[in-house]
Image (cartoon, rainbow, N blue to C red):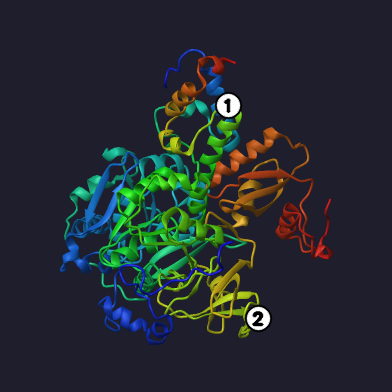
Amino acid sequence: MNMLPDGADALRKAVFDTLHRIAPEVLPDELESGVPLRDQVDLDSMDWLNFLLGLHAGLGVDIPEADYMKLVTLDDLFSYLEAKLGQSSVRR
Amino acid sequence: MRAAIIRKSAQTGYPRAHLLDYEAECRQFSWQRVSAELGIAPGGGINIGHAAVDRHLNTPVRDRTAFRFVGRDKRRRDFSYSELALQTNRFANALRALGVGRGDRIFILAGRIPELYIGVLGALKNGSVVSPLFSAFGPEPIRTRMAIGEGRVLLTTETLYRRKVSGITGDLPALEHILLVGENGARTRVPGTHDLATLMAAASDHFESERTSEDDLALLHFTSGTTGTPKGAMHAHGAAVTHFSTGRYALDLHADDVFWCTADPGWVTGTSYGIIAPLLHGVTSIVDEAEFDAEGWYRLLQEERVTVWYTAPTAIRMLMKAGTELARKFRFPALRFIASVGEPLNPEAVWWGEDAFGLPIHDNWWQTETGGIVIANTPAMDIKPGSMGKPLPGMQACIIRRPQDSGACEEITEPNVEGELALRAGWPSMFRGYLGQEERYRKCFAGDHYLTGDLAKCDEDGYYWFIGRADDVIKSAGHLIGPFEVESALMEHPAVAEAGVIGKPDPVTGESVKAFVSLKTGFAASDELNLELLGHARRRLGAAVAPKEIAFLPSLPRTRSGKIMRRLLKARELGLPERDISTLEADT
């Protein structure tokens, strides 16, 4: 499991809460953050889109379509969102 | 304001379209002549695996790329026709070594990896019957389909096996052999299974295809009805004749084409047109192993220089959502023809093709049961955006009123009058039955017509227009979902008393699955329970079939005979007037 930097707990929670609303069967502890998320969780194209839209709505982060390709693993997502948010806003 | 018709000129476009004179071609058409082109003598038999691959080995096509797999890491893997012949021979020999032969049923559950394609073609060469399953199915749809199909062999990946199959093998008494593909080329060591790579390495690459007849079963494709279990539509080796002819007329495949069919082989389009038709024509197919991604798709179209592209309305609408500017970052000079299937393509999407690619999108229509494209907008034909086009040569369609009894159907000859779309039976890729469900098969026919279950109309120029389904089947992202299968899974949850499932109109997927449930005494509706039910359904059914939305109701409306009135649920969801409420038993 990836060791996320201190203060990233709020971000983790936001990501997993969003995922939970789309795929409630997923247990976050069983996910490997370095493995493509969609290899571990059944998310069809609409689920994936709704997940990213949910993150946008929940975190107020703009995720342009052109960036979707970069977001494959949870690690990708965390570091992308961290960079966009900056640590201060993650802590809230 | 866009024009109602997109005019085509026979002079435009390169290469020259195969179907230039529609009327003449329809008049002169004969299935026998197409069969002869594929080397089928009357009564001489055909094997799809041979026709698609080995038939080319004595021609220059053997050195051409048959499949180019583009991995998620963008790495390319090419298989020439001759390489594909060797690999499929190995797979056929591996099956034979396991004692698997003609008529035995083989299920394949995998993403779009080379082993899937080699497995399908090798099994066909071996005379076995192949059923590809969509890898986004959950354990329950996999179990139901494999039980109906009495699969002896399952080819899958180690990951999918662990996630979806290992828990259901006890319910599949016919299943004898499980062949696993390891991750990233690694060998697998899972007790009770075989490592595919080891079997392939031990097998010879010489194989003589089974001499199957046109009527021997080749493929089993599952589809859904309103009630009961999924239906296994059986297709015979002779279906290749339709795949070949429609590849020519509807997709306009020419020898030097680079073709990309975006459908997954777990659905009939991905097999008929993602595997068989392009190989019959000796063209190069691109296979994208990644999931949908707008920019990734544009990049692939550009970099692989795709010439003919066959995709689906949901994907097109997702591309439209991503914006035309994204498309304009790329160049598509090689692209010359775009077709779409799965559900009616809205006129805006047909026109959007012009904006994004400089080409309109050509809608076509067919079903699992028809095995191949039946009605299409073809390259040289004027397009009426929103219409599915005209019946291809060799196909006869009409609009009928469904007979009340088993009598002959009544044809509606007046233009623009709604009725059920029916097809004159007997084309080569027509399904030969629903496995083990003879009665359901018989009900699809009236006189010499196959009744499609789709409501449509035909205009004064012979163009067909889709209206809707005649039954309660849900069409989401071009795939049919049976409400009964979803309801059954929900009913298994201890809190659920009754469940009714409908297709809720969705701007991107056409319809999305929405479930209404009422709860047993002692359970109270809550957000938590809603998510628990959603999770339960997704675990059982997988993302492709499970509902996207669940709503609680105190009780569900039923007919006097006790059937849940899905149409009423839908009417309410849409805020439409509620008809037929006189037959309601109780509705609180």
Tell me the crowding category of disc 2: few under 14, some 14 to 19, or many 20 or more residues within 10 angstroms, Cα based. Answer: few
Which residue is under mark 1? Answer: A59
Quarter of the image holding residue B30? bottom left
Question: Which of B397/B181 is in front?
Answer: B397
Q: Amino acid at mark 1?
A: Leu
x and y percentages locating residue B327 in the rendered image: 43, 48
**Nearer mark to the viewer, of 2 and 1:** 1
In the displayed orientation, state which residue is furthest to the front: B1
x and y percentages locating residue B316 in the rendered image: 49, 53
Question: Which of B382/B180 is in front?
Answer: B382
x and y percentages locating residue B80 in the rendered image: 21, 56
Q: Are marks 2 and 1 on the same chain?
A: no
Query: Element at badge 1?
Result: helix
Q: Does residue B162 lie above or below B142 as drawn?
A: above
Q: In the displayed structure, does residue B86 sit left or right of residue B275?
A: left
Query: Element at badge 2?
Result: loop
Q: Does residue B34 lie above or below B355 as drawn?
A: below
Q: Amino acid at mark 2?
A: Pro
Q: CA distance from mark 2 to mark 1?
A: 57 Å
Note whether residue B263 is visible: no
Quarter of the image holding residue A74? top left
x and y percentages locating residue A55 in the rendered image: 56, 31
Residue in the picture at 32% in, 54% down: B286
Q: Residue B536 bears which disc, if any? A: none
Mark 2 belongs to chain? B
Mark 1 belongs to chain? A
Residue in the picture at 17% in, 56% down: B204
Q: Residue B403 bears which disc, if any? A: 2
Tell me the crowding category of disc 1: few under 14, some 14 to 19, or many 20 or more residues within 10 angstroms, Cα based. Answer: some
